[in-house]
Amino acid sequence: MATAEWKMAELGARSGVPVATIKFYQRENLLPSGERTGPNQALYGEAHLGRIRLIRALIEVGGLSIVAARQVLEAIDSERPLQETFEIAQHSVSEAIDPETLTTDALTHVDALMSGWHVSADNPGRLAAARVYDTFTGVGQVDAAGWFRRYAAAALLAAEADIDELDARAERAAKAEIVVVGTVLGDTLFSGLRRAAQEHVSALRYATPPAAEV
Amino acid sequence: MATAEWKMAELGARSGVPVATIKFYQRENLLPSGERTGPNQALYGEAHLGRIRLIRALIEVGGLSIVAARQVLEAIDSERPLQETFEIAQHSVSEAIDPETLTTDALTHVDALMSGWHVSADNPGRLAAARVYDTFTGVGQVDAAGWFRRYAAAALLAAEADIDELDARAERAAKAEIVVVGTVLGDTLFSGLRRAAQEHVSALRYATPPAAEV
DNA sequence: TTAGCATGGATAGTGTAACTATCTGATATA
DNA sequence: TATATCAGATAGTTACACTATCCATGCTAA
């Protein structure tokens, strides 16, 4: 693609990321080294700039840790089947949950929501949902079955949109990147849109008189 | 309600939270002190246990910081109008975004998704969605308008479920708690369900032959 | 051609957040 | 009365994501 043409100072200036931080990302194997032209000289180009933007998106917007970001970047770079890249992305954004800490009640209720779905027992999302169920009841909330069911319907819509977007890309590299970016940024996007929608729905529902008072 | 009847060691045992951590939560004003019976003696009861469970739910499952948790707990305890409690909960789970850092293009596109919605300009969700838009395009993804639109539809479903759940509670205290818990845990719930749904949809779409090979 | 600034890589240091451990004097308990 | 436990104050720890300094070498302008 583009040839490497800048030194690190310019890469820092173009990306807006401090040079010390770029060096840190290289040490952490998030960012490959530049094109070497001597023992202490190297050049960087558009590819590096794009990678830095991706790293920042994962970390700042998606909230990934350095370790999780490294895992998904490695998955993008690898030639693994797309399915595996998807799994790695899912595991990286989900914290590990020990199924032992969940009640069977929670798993039963969550599985009921997903009846008809093809989901493996160790899907991290299934465990995360069950944990929310336990937390919700542990905090004294009851009768939220309807809430959970409607969230499952919304999640299905989003997942279909995700997969359609994936289908729209042709090459493996593009697919792998959108799998990762979509998985990571999708959570952030949805939570933002939900907050906006909440304001809208509650405004509709509890409409204040025309001369609104705050 | 229930009378205070345990000393801190038992509160720790019942909640599963180390005594040192409970003391830390008291110092941070997340948890009120026990019922004093002497200069260095105090008793705790069910109310404290419930509060500890709520604190852990917000921090561990919802991912809130100590500071954010304190804000929403104070909002629950206060006698503020529900609308304000809602706003505090929303702000606590959303990181602050400076609108100056967003492109007008992003805001225009996000507002187009929400045409017909009653959402104020400084709604934190609107800004968060716009940032995702900028990040998405900055990372080289294009033509994601359909993806965003379908996420907005899913978010609307979830928000309606949220508000219905709120309507189902009678007292202010119960409403305030579900506003907070729903806002905080709703994100976690949705992201879990979405991951499960992704596995389901992609399994449907790219069905492997009966004898599946991994 | 040489003075001086920049470079890449290694190493060490910083700031923040969320605990966790120790200490102290007082109180319950066997 | 001897021992353990208590609440509260203070200090220490761990993990994380940078950030700063060093050093030997290379580029660069006078």
Image: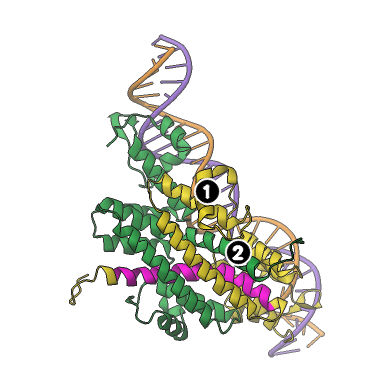
Chain colours: A yellow, B green, C orange, D purple
Callout 1 amino acid = Thr
* Position of residue A98 measured from the top left corner of the image (x, y, whole percent): 59, 46
Q: Is residue A93 left or right of residue B157?
A: right
Q: Is residue B171 left or right of residue B117?
A: left
- Of the pair B213 and B81, the residue shown nearer to us: B213
| Mark 1 closeness class: few <14, some 14–19, many ≥20 residues within 10 Å | few
| Mark 2 closeness class: few <14, some 14–19, many ≥20 residues within 10 Å | many
- Of the pair C22 and A98, the residue shown nearer to us: A98
Q: Quadrant of the C terminus of chain B?
A: bottom right
Establish whether labels 1 and 2 are both on one chain.
no
Which numbered disc covers residue A108? 1
Task: Let me know if residue A65 appears in the view.
Answer: no
Cα distance in 3D space between marks 1 and 2? 18 Å
Tell me if residue A196 is in the magenta stretch.
yes
State the residue at coordinates (41%, 34%): B11
> Could you tell me which secondary element the residue under label 1 belongs to?
helix
Q: In this view, does B168 lie above or below C3?
A: above
Which residue in the protein does label 2 denote? B200
